[in-house]
Image (tube, grey):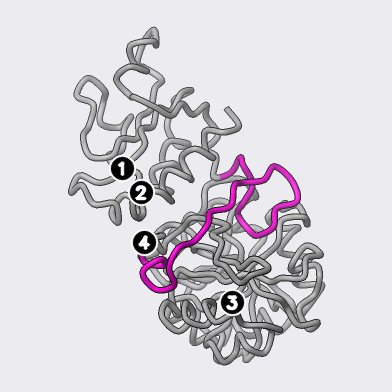
Amino acid sequence: MGMIGSNLHRAKSIIEAGGLVAVPTETVYGLAADALNIEAVTSVFSAKNRPTFDPLIVHVDTLEAAEKYIEKWPPKALALAEKFWPGPLTLLLPKKEVISDLVTSGMEKVAIRVPDSELTLKLLGLLKRPLVAPSANPFGYVSPTCPQHVDDQLGDKISYILDGGPCEIGLESTIVGFDASDNAVIYRLGGLNIESIQAEIGAVKTKSHSSSNPQAPGMLTSHYSPHVAVKLGNIRKSLDTLHGIKRVGVISFTEPIRELPTDQQVVLAPDGSLKTAAKNLFSALRYMDTININTLLIEEVPDHGLGKAINDRLRRAAAKH
């Protein structure tokens, strides 16, 4: 099992020695390593069993720090960074040579962001080096939103888990890149909603997922998957087609299913808030892997604001089934 604590100097020493530390962010917990150390970056792929064709996100503590690693800043990228950093926004921009091709899976652009976590920002400030920090979970599984989630899945592969408490947002960052004409393109829906981005820079396009060679982190079609069969749709209609409810789990948006035992279901947002649903989503998926079910029924949430990102994760959780 991993050691959980809040000792920044311990975390710093481990990373400087080429080791791995799980770090908190406002989105999910990341598996951090020195982004400029090829061996350490390789260890991240190995610990997660992540294919090297899936690029990593680089984390820095300020916009000024990000400028050391970026070759070109489209005006809209700078506007978004100034508005939303620190925060759940990742920018996909042309990289300088100091960022290795391993980090970017051979592509000329690097995904970079400033996380909104006091502990991790302090750690970055102490290190004065960028960190790669993909979600601290086995590749393809549900992202961790608290230290115990990390320990349960990767505790034997991580030297230290920096405890920042539960993640405030609970969904990964939104990734925004730019085409040849510097028009904004959303590569991954996430914790920053499209409406907020459009309010700042105008219209944006949305990129579809990829089954191989993704252009940005988190674009694979099948992802965020629990270990049981997932069926997405109308929960009550789905229940009617089953021969019993003994081994059925349910994740609903605002209302419980009265005929189902309470320990077989999770209501994401009894208050009706999409923010609450986002925060609880990954914990709900993980909970369903701890109970004795063979089918998980999930309903989509309203498809606006953070709901678009939540539904994106739900569809990909169900994709391999």
Counting residues from the start of the chain, the first of labels 1 and 3 encountered is 3
**Circle 3 sits on which residue?**
59
Q: CA distance from mark 3 to mark 2?
A: 25 Å
The residue lying furthest to the front in this view is: 181
**Circle 1 sits on which residue?**
302
| Quadrant position of the C terminus in the picture | top right
- Label 1 or label 3, whichever lies nearer to me, is 1
- Label 3 or label 2, whichever lies nearer to me, is 2
Please tell me which residue lies in front, 318 or 18: 318
Q: Are marks 4 and 3 in contact (CB under 8 Å)?
A: no
Q: Amino acid at mark 4?
A: Glu
Counting residues from the start of the chain, the first of labels 4 and 2 encountered is 4
Q: Position of residue 258 (x, y in %)?
A: 19, 24
Q: CA distance from mark 4 to mark 3?
A: 24 Å
Q: What mark, if any, has residue 195 been given in the picture?
A: 4
SS state under label 4: helix
- Magenta range is 195-223
Q: What mark, if any, has residue 307 been given in the picture?
A: 2
Q: Are marks 1 and 3 in contact (CB under 8 Å)?
A: no
Q: Quadrant of residue 158?
A: bottom right
Q: Position of residue 317 (x, y in %)?
A: 52, 38
